[in-house]
Amino acid sequence: MPHIIVNKVGSGEVDHSPQFQSLYHFAEQGQSTPPLNSSFRLITWNIDFQAQGGHLRMAAALRYLEQLTSEAPKTLPLVIFLQEMTRVTLSLIQKAPWIQKRFNLTDIDPSNWRGAEYGTTTLVDRRLPVRSVYRVHYKTNMRRDGLFVDLAATSTSEDGGERMVRLCNSHFESLKAFPPLRPAQVGIVAEQLHMPEVYGGLVAGDFNAIQDFDRTLHTDNGLEDAYLALGGQEDAEEGYTWGQQAHPHVRQRYGCSRMDKIFYCGGVKVESLQRVGVGVKVEESKREMMRNLGEMEFVTDHYGLMVDVIVE
């Protein structure tokens, strides 16, 4: 729930240095992967870990994501950011044949989540050349971090040289904190995206944007907000990504909001932003079971986002 006050985090120092981790493959990659040629499609989606029936909801989410990936142009690589994953949902991801065939994974268990019950994971198209995978820890009450993947890409500029494109999957601090935590967390990500060796950068995920300062975190950090850059307006219903699929009493109390966002900078631009996961429910035969558990039939309380990313 978005507006509950939480205690301030402790004053201890946090190590913000990159914590490198493995990229997991289902099969031998064979020859080295050439640099990304100009564009890829990004999907980001938060699958509520707290609602009951997590395995049923994730199974339905994966069927829907399989459909989305099958509808993408065959030549267009995909990257999928997922938030609020659990040990159970990571297991379901690994068992999905379509994922085994097409993607590499940043996580196969919760070992990179510093003891948290849930965390982020990224699926990277096997055709994309990954140079590194790492996390940067935030000052947080909730063990949140930024999960980074560095890709090698070929610029469309005349020299056509290899460039580094840095992607960050993040679930920023939920609720309210005193002092606020999200501004510093977004600032840490922006610092990584603005590093000299990075040609273009992007951060996407659940920004938990519920306070006035959240509206300017992109401009405060030299980033573009994809929704606004493509003509979207704040407080417009078509931009909301949270609340529409929440329990009615929760929606009545907190309303709807644009919690999920995509920020970018440098030599990348975005096209064709759209919400995904709208109205996606567990399979029909399981919906009565979900109702009996006191849950909604929806896969999650968030809409996801999908966008095409162009390396200029």
Image (tube, grey):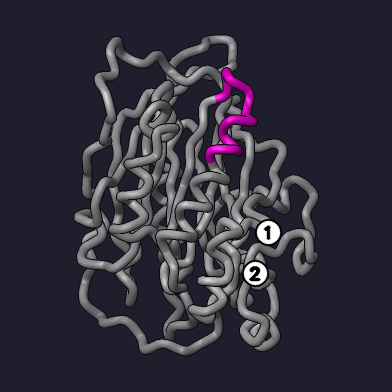
Local secondary structure at mark 2: loop
Local secondary structure at mark 1: loop
Residue of label 1? 279
Residue at point 44%, 68% (across, down): 53
Of residues 277 and 281, the one nearer the viewer is: 281
Query: Dividing the picture into quarters, in which one does residue 172 lie?
Result: bottom left
Q: Answer above or below: position of 30 versus 132.
A: above
Position of residue 187 in the picture relative to residue 270 (left or right): left
User: In this picture, which residue range is highlighted in magenta?
Assistant: 66-76
Q: Answer above or below: position of 7 versus 139.
A: below
Q: Is 28 contained in the magenta span?
A: no
Amino acid marked by disc 1 = Gly
Mark 1: give few (<14), some (14-19) or many (20+) Cα within 10 Å. few
Q: Is 70 contained in the magenta span?
A: yes
Residue 72 in sight here: yes
Residue 190 in sight here: no
In what quadrant of the picture does the C terminus appear?
top right
Residue 202 in picture, x, y percent from top left: 51, 43
Query: Dividing the picture into quarters, in which one does residue 34 lie?
Result: top left
Residue 245 - label: 2
The answer for how far apart the CA atoms under marks 2 and 1 are is: 8 Å
Mark 2: give few (<14), some (14-19) or many (20+) Cα within 10 Å. many
Residue at point 70%, 85% (across, down): 252
Residue at point 42%, 21% (across, down): 127
Q: Are marks 2 and 1 in contact (CB under 8 Å)?
A: yes
Most distant residue in the front direction: 285
Residue 99 in picture, x, y percent from top left: 41, 35
Amino acid marked by disc 2 = Gln
